Image (tube, rainbow, N blue to C red):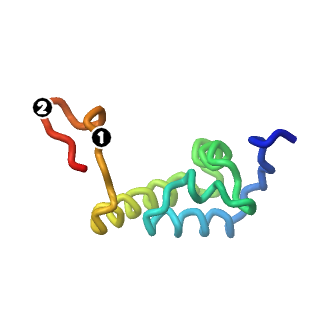
Amino acid sequence: MSAHAKYAPKYTRELDETICQRLANGEALKAICREDAMPASRTVRTWVAKDLNGFAARYAQARELGLREVLARGNWKLSAAQAPAGEDAHV
């Protein structure tokens, strides 16, 4: 197994709930998935695409809540390349 390969655990409701709770708290998917017990982010996105046991809706809701949490804490940065045309970046 290469240094970048990662064990891909099967979908479980427990992983679903853990990932969604952490996303809703403002954690990034990549940060969550860096942990040994977690699936790769690509695996999670596959679960979303396949909508395993309704995961897609819970994931989308968690991402929205997480974004609101991050914005409420002021923990966001927008680079000039990401800023909409005609707007200054907030850093």
Between label 2 and label 1, give the one nearer the viewer.
1
Q: Tell which of 13 and 76 is nearer to you.
A: 76
Left or right, 34 with respect to 81, comes to right
Quadrant, the N terminus: top right
The residue depicted at 31 percent of the width and 50 percent of the height is 77
Left or right, 49 with respect to 60, comes to right
Q: In what element is the residue under mark 2? A: loop
- 86 is higher (above) or lower (below) than 27: above
- 22 is higher (above) or lower (below) than 90: below
Q: Position of residue 30 (x, y in %)?
A: 57, 51
Q: Position of residue 82 (x, y in %)?
A: 29, 36
**Numbered badge on residue 79:** 1
Q: Position of residue 72 (x, y in %)?
A: 28, 67
The residue depicted at 50 percent of the width and 56 percent of the height is 28
Three-letter amino acid code at disc 1? Answer: Ser
Q: In what element is the residue under mark 1? A: loop
The residue depicted at 59 percent of the width and 45 percent of the height is 45
| Residue at which label 2 appears | 86
Left or right, 75 with respect to 15, comes to left
The residue depicted at 67 percent of the width and 64 percent of the height is 15
**Numbered badge on residue 42:** none
**Mark 2 → mark 1, Cα distance in angstroms:** 13 Å
Q: Residues within 10 Å of mark 2 (few under 14, many from 20)?
A: few
Three-letter amino acid code at disc 2? Answer: Gly
Rendered image quadrant of residue 38: bottom right
- 62 is higher (above) or lower (below) than 91: below
